[in-house]
Image (tube, rainbow, N blue to C red):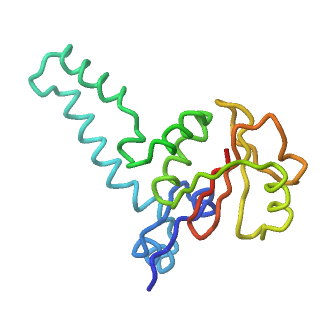
Amino acid sequence: MAKRRPSLKDFLATGDVVVDEAVTEEKEKEGTPAAAKKTAPAKKKAAGEAKKAAVGDGKKPAARAKKTAARAKKPSAEKAGLTADEAALLEMLAPEDKPMWEKLFAAAETEFLPLDLVERREDFRTMARDRYTLFRLGEAGEPLFHVRTSVQIREPLVCLIKWDETGKISVFR
């Protein structure tokens, strides 16, 4: 059986990017969301770590605070194994868009291409709407805007993100 590609529709429905075919098969057999199965062990682990922190591990509180602050400063993009271009794009996204796109960039194949507005409008008019989804980033820090008509592809524009349901992301900037 072929490896299942990540799906934006699955993420929007369940809150999790599904890339493992075993989880997908379990989901289909039992009728339960894959997100519930994946997050349960993580919640137990987080609860255990919180319990350890509350009891104390023999370290001074100041040392623990410094270590926590150092971890917070590390960009999560490095943990996910993202490229420099992907990490830079994530920094431009609104806080509510970052978690979703960080998971998608980590799971999908991403390419960065030059932006030509006329070409993008024509591509939008002819693309299969059930396979592709186009998002517009007007300015850094703004939420992504789902493009519904070709007229919305205009300046001011930082980039366009074209999501392909086969697991490919094209970023035009």
In the figure, is residue 87 to the left or right of 92?
Answer: left
Point out residue 93 in the picture as x, y percentages from the top left corner: 61, 36
Which residue is nearer to you in this view: 104 or 45? 104
Q: Residue furthest top?
A: 62
Write the residue at 75% across / 36% down.
138
Quadrant for the C terminus, please.
top right
> Which residue is at 71% across, 64% downward?
132
46 sits to left or right of 102:
left
* Total residue callouts: 0
Q: Residue furthest right?
A: 151
Q: Residue at x 40, y 34 (%)?
A: 75
Q: Position of residue 116 (x, y in %)?
A: 77, 49
Compared to 159, does 16 lie above or below? below
Residue 137, quarter of picture: top right
User: Which of 135 and 114 lies nearest the eye of the viewer?
Assistant: 114
**Quadrant occupied by the N terminus:** bottom left
- Examine the rendered structure and indicate whether residue 5 appears above or below residue 157: below
Farthest-out residue, bottom: 1
Task: Tell me residue 31's x, y (percent).
Answer: 52, 74
- Write the residue at 90% across / 49% down: 151
In the rendered image, the vertical position of residue 139 relative to residue 150, given as above or below: above
